[in-house]
Amino acid sequence: MEFTDTYKHMGPCSFSPNARFLAVAVDYRLVIRDVLTLKVVQLFSCLDKITYIEWALDSEYILCGLYKRPMLQAWSLAQPEWTCKIDEGPAGISYARWSPDSRHILTTSEFQLRLTVWSLLNTACIHLQWPKHGSKGVSFTKDGKFAAICTRRDCKDYVNLLSCHTWEIMGVFAVDTLDLADIQWSPDDSAIVIWDSVLEYKVLIYSPDGRCLSKYQAYESGLGIKSVSWSPCSQFLAVGSYDQMIRVLNHLTWKVFAEFTHLSTVRGPCAAAVFKEVDEPFQLDMSELSLSDEFVQRNADNASEALVQVRYDVMEVPITLPSQKPQADKPNPKQGIGLMAWSSDSQYICTRNDSMPTVLWIWDVQHLELASILIQKDPIRAAAWDPTCPRLVLCTGSTNLYMWTPSGAYCINVPYSHFSVLDLKWNSNGSCLLLKDKELFCCAALPLLQESTDYSSDD
């Protein structure tokens, strides 16, 4: 694995959809870098500190959210002199997003008073009253032709289907939710999934014309759904809940065909490989060197810290996993499936049960079994699949990267002292991995790995 030099950031970072550019916020400046060389290709100055950035799908425009103002600024890479500023006035802006055609910007006002569609072509704007959420409740079809926008009026939730060409409302239908949480089109645009708030376990599948295809409710009492995710192939819908289970529905009957439980004790028979992160002190023989006792004593503590590396040990089952009991007297308990992501080939899904924050589970959906368990020393902060192959990379806020493939798991040391990997992102073609510290970032290039049956875990 090759690492670039480190560079400064003071906010969000984002790859362009065409994988050619990296946008970095540094206070009020927007820095556009080339992904291959990381050289600066454009520099834009905003009116305030940048809190949010998003590329247009054609990678030609980029918007910056200055939510402290609150206002938006948009820039063009092809025409650096072109600029756009959007200010909602007293209504404010709580969130903004691009439309699929890359020529319209959708903003949601404070207190969800209205959603506005701003045109970059003729400066026209269209309003939709009472959007349900700020950052959620809006989903576009993959072909970019339609938008599903959730609204709420008269204490009832509705879905509005809009044409992304004319922005006219094509249809409106009420949904059977108490408090709609979010909405997602399936990747093949054939169905819409809607789920209720954490107080009500309810998953609803609708056709684009508003017919309810299925209603699923795993249980009635207790906290409900925490995460929902379509598989890239659109054949599976995974639902993670507070009862520490994920349930996978199929697209033919919308019935559950797999249930994966996250237990604190894993017993046999179990075909999964269990990897545990352990310290591996670096052994250096200095017996033949002429060093004074004072020098050895003075550097003993620093050397022991600097030369400690980590590796994975393969553990045997049964094994008890580290877990913590959620506090009953506090809201939003740390329990349930808080992280869930599909591999690009839809064969694997990785999950994290928030009551076991240091454990990552990898499930094989094709064989309906647990494929692997990764036990880390620190809580898992982020995990992301390679967009091109079943390779998973995760970070825990330490100076190491952790990688899993079907052939094994690996620990990789980032070659910069005091660089803690707090977040990571792939670019769209899998050629570059962004690693973020608090105020620094670097990129890494991962080579294609040769498949092996050896579970060697050294970096």
Image: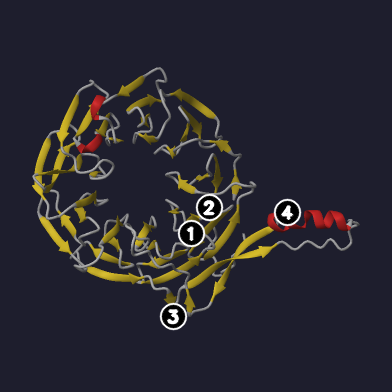
Around disc 3, counting alpha carbons within 10 Å, would you say few (fewer than 14), some (14 to 19), or many (20 or more)? Answer: few
Q: In front: mark 3 or mark 4?
A: 4
Are discs 2 and 1 less than 8 Å apart at CB? yes
Q: Amino acid at mark 1?
A: Pro
**Distance from Cα at disc 1 to Cα at disc 4:** 25 Å
| Front of the two marks 3 and 1 | 1
Horizontal and vertical percent position of residue 160:
14, 42
Which residue is at a point 59% across and 41% down the rendered structure image? 4
Question: What residue did someone put label 2 on?
Answer: 397
Please say if the residues under marks 3 and 2 sit with CB atoms less than 8 Å apart: no
Which one is earlier in the sequence, the residue at label 1 or at label 4? 4
Q: Nearer the viewer, mark 2 or mark 4?
A: 4
Find disc 3 in the rendering and name its residue: 267
Distance from Cα at disc 3 to Cα at disc 4: 41 Å
Q: Is residue 167 above or below residue 293?
A: above
In the rendered image, the residue lying farthest to the bottom is 269
Q: What residue sits right under mark 1 in the picture?
A: 379
Find numbered disc 4 in the image and state the secondary structure of the residue it sits on.
Answer: helix
Q: Nearer the viewer, residue 402 or 71?
A: 71
